[in-house]
Image (tube, rainbow, N blue to C red):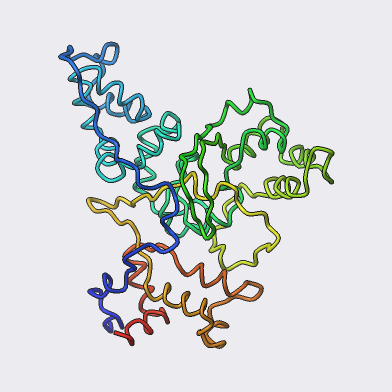
Amino acid sequence: MSPPRIARNLIPELTCPREFGLRGMIRDLAPAKSSTISRATASSLGQLDPLPAELLLITLGLLDFQSLSRILRASLRGKELVEALPAYKDMMEHAPETLTALGRTGLLKHHSALLLHQTLQSDKCVSCFNFGGFLFLPTCERVSADCLYENIALRMTTPTIAKQCFGLTGKQLQRIPVMYSIPNTYEMWLQISRKRVYRLVSVKHVKQLAIEIHGSAENVAKLMPNAPTANMTERQIAIFKQFHEASLEPPGCDLSRLPRDEEAIGDDYCAMASIRFPFLKGAGVDNGRVCRGCLFAAELHAREEIPEMSIQEIVPPGVTSDRSYIGLIRLRLEEDFFEHIQTCRGVDLVLQME
């Protein structure tokens, strides 16, 4: 077997020092810290005490981190058991900022420790099946940056829009998680500034709920107005149309390589419900890395310095070249990254310059 064209020791050199375009999510949060017992308490778990240790750990794994925090503070035995829970140890060690984000957004109580741990140990985006370097907080699913931008089912909306769009009541909406946004400036290929707290729900959750309430997807489709009513703008009806047409099935492919509706309405809450999320594999963590060669190629394209022949090789029919080149900037796990740099044209250009 012939040696690779580009050596593995060049991976750090070919990794972007900054994650261009991928740092506009929830960020800069203080990591969660383990709770402490403020006073000496009996080493008892009350009704849980008779359970054997193995069954206790299984039971604790089904609880959310908010409940685990209460148990941890309740007694010395509770503290010992919670801190011995693999899900607790791994999340506190490798993704404490995620726990802070879930707490700040009011979503911590909606996901069990077991589910968070399973997602930490998975690597695939729920939409495209490539590496998902972000956690979509409302559903506790991995997502890629492209899918956050392109997949309408991964958008957020307000409860008011959700009720109007899918014929739901406020009481019915209480059956799905409601997120409280964190004021900040967010960016996912476009920049938005949100200075106040918004109550938001996942389009995916809302549409699933609507199908459950109304009996079928066909019944839900009948709720879509054919034309704006007196209280609706053209933009609102376009948003309603996008939400109704959002597929609940994963596309299972790279959306940046598919033709895009250029008249699509932009995401009003883009990147506000996601955070960088590492992949835990065995004893090691892989956060993913962005290829310097891909970034360089995208920058050359923006300056119109890419030969037409190269553009034709990269850009699929019916897809804008801008979208395709932006789509190159993605997170890859180390093994995929190593395979990618063997054939990346941008990597060749970077190495020629150095």
Left or right of residue 55, residue 252 in this image: right
Left or right of residue 196, residue 29 in this image: left
The residue at the point 58 percent across, 54 percent down is 151
The residue at the point 73 percent across, 45 percent down is 236
Residue at the far front in the pictured view: 195
**In x, y percent, where is residue 271?**
50, 50
In depth, the one of 114 and 300 nearer the eye is 300
Quadrant position of the C terminus in the picture: bottom left
In depth, the one of 298 and 212 nearer the eye is 298
Quadrant position of the N terminus in the picture: bottom left
The residue at the point 38 percent across, 29 percent down is 64
**In x, y percent, where is residue 72?**
25, 23
As displayed, is residue 218 above or below residue 186? above
**In x, y percent, where is residue 219?**
76, 37
Residue at the far left in the pictured view: 40
Q: Quadrant of residue 75?
A: top left
Q: Quadrant of residue 211?
A: top right
Left or right of residue 102, residue 258 in this image: right
Left or right of residue 75, residue 121 in this image: right
Tally of numbered discs = 0
**In x, y percent, where is residue 267?**
60, 51
As displayed, is residue 187 above or below residue 43? below
In depth, the one of 197 and 112 nearer the eye is 197
The residue at the point 31 percent across, 29 percent down is 58
As displayed, is residue 82 above or below residue 280? above
